[in-house]
Image (tube, rainbow, N blue to C red):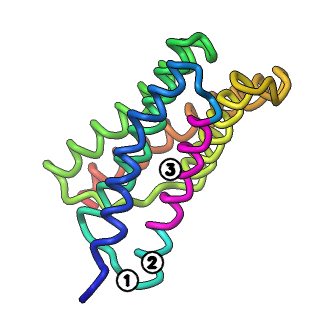
Amino acid sequence: MSLSWLPNAISILRIALIAPILTLILQGSFGWALALFWLAGFSDGLDGYLAKRFSWHTRLGALLDPVADKLLVAGLFITLAYTQDIPVWLAAVVIVRDVVIVAGATVYNFFVRPVEGEPSRVSKLNTALQLLFLLSVISRAGFGWPEPIALTVLGASVLVTVVISGVDYVWCWSRRARHGE
């Protein structure tokens, strides 16, 4: 029996972890929220490893993995802005970028050709900085660490890479659409 379904099941599990993580943050249970956040991060690495290692790539998996990531990140930014642990404007910038990317990918998929997921280097850096920032904010809220200056530097880094990667996506995909690539 093939286990090629396993990466998709892990992505679905990651989506299922989002509501409990957000609920725990709203309840002030930051230790448990961090534990589930780490589990979600580990599962993201695990499903990617399994898909690559055993060639268990599917179209569903190519969609589920980034959807799980975007839902987790968006949910955390919205929740942490609601709890006033991060500025609302930063959450808004992150969410707007993701909405633009998802809307652009949807339009491209229907009017040009199916989208192949190929995040740029700056987008990968942005994702890593967002996750580190969110991890740090949750840790600061629950345990008083790291120092506020670290959150300021990480938040500024997230802002810069959000803008650069958002512009990069719009520029590259617009060029591809014009050339029918």
Q: Nearer the viewer, mark 2 or mark 3?
A: 3
Magenta-drawn stretch contains 48:
no
Residue lying at 65% horizontally and 29% vertically, measured from the top left: 138
The residue drawn where x is 41% and y is 38% is 18
Q: Give the answer, above or below, for where 10 lies relative to 74.
A: below
Residue closest to the eye, 137 or 16: 16
Kind of element beneath mark 1: loop
Name the quadrant of the N terminus.
bottom left
Residues marked 2 and 1 touching at CB (< 8 Å): yes
Residue furthest to the bottom in view is 1
Q: Position of residue 81 (x, y in %)?
A: 54, 15
Q: Secondary structure at mark 2?
A: helix
Is residue 56 placed above or below 15 in the rendered structure? below
User: For the residue marked with disc 1, what is the amino acid?
Assistant: Ser
State the SS at label 3.
Answer: helix
Instruction: Give residue 52's mark.
Output: 2
**Residue 16, horizontal then vertical, whole percent:** 35, 44
Is the C terminus in the top left, top right, bottom left or bottom right quadrant? bottom left
For the residues labelled 2 and 1, the Cα–Cα distance comes to 5 Å
Residues at marks 2 and 3, CA–CA distance in whole angstroms = 18 Å
Residue 69, given in percent of the width and then of the height, sits at 44, 46
What segment is highlighted magenta in the picture? 32-47
Which residue is the site of mark 1?
A: 55
Q: Which residue lies under the disc numbered 3?
A: 40
